[in-house]
Amino acid sequence: FDRWVSEAHQHNYGATFYRNPDGSYVRDKAGHYFMVYERVTEERDGGPWNTEIFLTKVDASLRRVSGAETSIQPTIKGDGQYFKASERNSGAEGHLLEGGRPVKWWDGDGWRWLVAFSGGDYVTTRYGMHIAISENAEPDSKYLPVTDTSGELIDFAEVLRCLLKATWGPGRPSIFYDEHGRMWALFHYISQDQIPKDEVNDGWPVSAQEFVKRHRRVGLVPVSIELSGGKLQVKIDPRDDVSPEFRESISRCQNPAQN
């Protein structure tokens, strides 16, 4: 992968291949695979300063890049400013969007691709789940980020964060289908309940002794993703096998103003 990895921090640490809902790999007519990954695009002081999410094709041997690189999610908005979600340490240490994971999605009229990813400040409650959507059913088509009225990336992890009492996430989401065609979201986070009350629970710990207590957990929840009124909605799906207590917690976190 000489066009994908170089010596000067042009590294990838989140590559994954496009798959169909049944788990089979997506391939073009030539048998090439589609791969999404993040790549350092700018360095400062000898280290990575800006990291963005890209897509390329890999040949059938899985040893060679076989197509042009497609930008899925840059850190800069259309107005030339950085997305706030991309900031590492309030932007002082650069910008990062990472963990792109694709899933095929029916938008009501046809198939498209969602790429779920996370932002830069992973040691805070601002580290969440964002989504970019392809314009059509082709994996290497143009992607548009899901943003609010101010043009900032929407964090779809807010309800999960409330439900799990989470910090440092929920992040790096992977959305997939089970054998019944139902959607699930897999992610990692740290529970605020495991952090002593006199220690920092939103940001870097003040010592190595505090840092080692931050054990990441892996979460798995059923979700539904749909368009409603032209807006993308990601909801925790309270299915038949979900306990009444869990249903009540979902309702409370989805409607905080009513509590």
Image: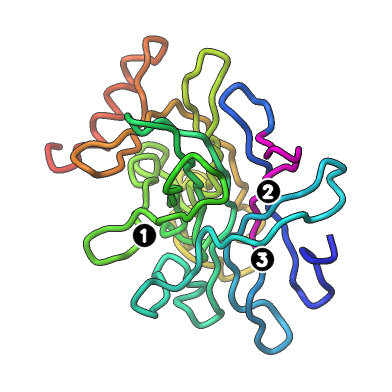
Residue that mark 1 sits on: 153
Q: Residues within 10 Å of mark 3 (few under 14, many from 20)?
A: many
Which residue is nearer to you in this view: 28 or 6? Answer: 28
Marks 3 and 2: which is nearer the front? 2
Q: Label 1 is placed on what type of residue?
A: Leu
Q: Which mark is residue 39?
A: 3
Q: Is residue 71 left or right of residue 63?
A: left
Q: Determine crowd level at label 2: few under 14, some 14-19, many 20+ residues with C-alpha closer than 10 A.
A: many
Q: Residue at x 59, y 60 (%)?
A: 70
Task: Report whether 41 appears left or right of 180.
Answer: right
Earlier in the chain: of badge 3 and badge 1, it is 3
Mark 1 vs 2, N-terminal side: 2
Residue 226 sits above or below residue 147 on the image: above
Q: Which residue is mark 2?
A: 35
The x, y position of residue 227, in whole percent, is: 28, 37
Q: Identify the residue shown where x is 71% and y is 51%.
A: 57
Q: Residue at x 32, y 33 (%)?
A: 226
As shown in the figure, which amino acid type bears the numbered disc 2?
Met
**Cβ atoms under marks 3 and 1 closer than 8 Å:** no
Q: Which residues are magenta?
A: 26-39
Quadrant hosting residue 126:
bottom left
Residue 30 on the magenta segment: yes
- Residue 12 image offset from top left, x and y in percent: 72, 60
Q: Residue furthest bottom?
A: 45
